[in-house]
Amino acid sequence: MRPHISHHRVRGTPFQAHGRTFIPEAQVTMISGREATIGGNNMSIRGFFAQRVQPTALIESTPQGERRYRIDDPTMRKLIGMLLAAVVIPVVSSLLGRTLGGGHGK
């Protein structure tokens, strides 16, 4: 089953705060897959769908135009850093162990 992935940005409903108009914006990522087999005893069906909505900006609408305030995701950056560390540290440790141990690990 080959998944289909799509990305698009959406804008939410404008709202007022202290006389200013703001519009929320988000990145929507969707992944889906489907498969079907018909005939004889091979009748089967499979499918899945997942969606992720990530806020990206708050847009201030003024008569002069739009001003964009980017929304940062420090948690995601930290999680990616932890994932990289979880992969890199064991690999480097293994390589150092083999190098410093003289290759007599067998």
Image (cartoon, rainbow, N blue to C red):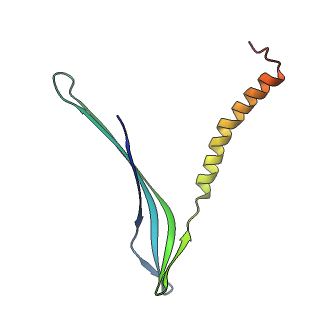
Q: Is residue 7 above or below residue 40?
A: below
Q: From the image, which quarter does the N terminus lie in?
A: top left
Name the image quarter holding the C terminus. top right
Which residue, as the protein is rendered here, is positioned at the far left?
A: 40
Give the x, y percent position of residue 63: 46, 87
Q: Quadrant of residue 70?
A: bottom right
* Residue 18 drawn at (x, y percent): 51, 85
Residue 98 position in % (x across, y down): 77, 22
Can you say whether 84 is above or below 8 in the image?
A: above
Q: Nearer the viewer, residue 67 or 55?
A: 67
Q: Residue at x 37, y 40 (%)?
A: 3
Residue 17: x %, y % from top left: 49, 82
> Residue at left 73%, top 27%?
94
Q: Looking at the image, which residue is at 43% across and 78% down?
A: 15
Q: How many marks?
A: 0
- Drawn side of residue 66 relative to residue 101, left or right: left
Where 63 sits versus 105, above or below? below
Quarter holding residue 33: top left
From the viewer's perspective, tell me whether residue 60 is left or right of residue 14. right
| Residue most extreme to the top | 106
